[in-house]
Image (cartoon, rainbow, N blue to C red):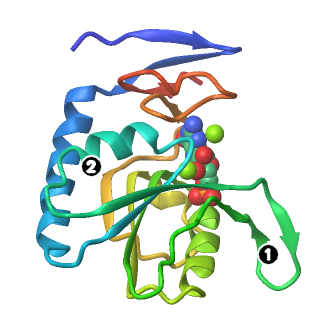
Amino acid sequence: MDPRTIQLHDCEFKTYIFEEEIIARIVMLAEQLDKEYAGKQPLFLAVLNGSFMFTADLLKRVTIPCEVSFIRLSSYQDTKSTGRVKEVLGLNEDIQNRHVIVLEDIVDTGHTVHGLLQQLRERHPASVEVATLLLKPDCLQHPLDIKYVAKPIPNDFVVGYGLDYNGLGRNLRDIYKIVP
Ligand code: 5GP
Ligand code: MG
Ligand code: MG
């Protein structure tokens, strides 16, 4: 595949993970979820905006009966006890006793997912796991057990396939990384 560079705002990005590899990894993830959630009728909770493309491509390949719902996280708010926790918006489902799988675009420090998991667990799901397209293992600041990872990446800023740089780049079919 030919490398390509693009300009978004003031930064240059070059192709990093091509669509073919993304889809191949998503196919494997879907097969794993099909096996591990058979008979459990899981509820996928996709975190907008970044996970929209990952969610669509993954769930097209999950064949067991399942539900999907979309949530957003409000911008950071300070709370005394737990640090910076985002409020969960749009969670109208009763998740008590449900098998929940959170769908994320990328886990970096893990602050976002850590806070989200705390809030979901207060609602007593039967189980809750995280499936993320990308994970930056070197950046994790929480002892999170992210069970489903399509691809671990180094600490580089990436865009495309749902991920944005100041609003741009979400529509790109491949993932690009910033050129320093
Ligand atoms: P956290 O540090 O809480 O794990 O990451 C929170 C959010 O930061 C992610 O959901 C994502 O929106 C953003 N983020 C982290 N790393 C990247 C990256 O490399 N590219 C883009 N576009 N967003 C990122
Ligand atoms: Mg996200
Ligand atoms: Mg963003």
Q: Tell me: is circle 2 under 8 Å from ligand 2.
A: no
Give the SS element for disc 1.
strand
**Percent position of residue 22, x then y:** 26, 37
Q: Earlier in the sequence, mark 2 or mark 1?
A: 2
Residue 12: image quadrant is top right
**Dot 1, crowdedness within 10 Å: few (<14), some or many (≥20)?**
few
- Label 2 sits on what residue type? Leu
Q: Quadrant of the N terminus?
A: top left
**In screen coordinates, is 59 left or right of 164?**
left
Residue at the spot 56% in from the left edge and 66% down from the top edge: 113
Q: Is residue 59 above or below residue 11?
A: below
Q: Amino acid at mark 1?
A: Gly
The residue singled out by tag 2 in the image is 59
Instruction: From the image, tell me which residue sits under label 1.
Output: 83
Q: CA distance from mark 2 to mark 1?
A: 33 Å
Please name whichever residue, 59 or 174, is drawn nearer the observer in this view of the structure: 59
Name the front one of labels 2 and 1: 2
Task: Name the foreground residue: 63 vs 171.
Answer: 63
- Under tag 2, what secondary structure? helix
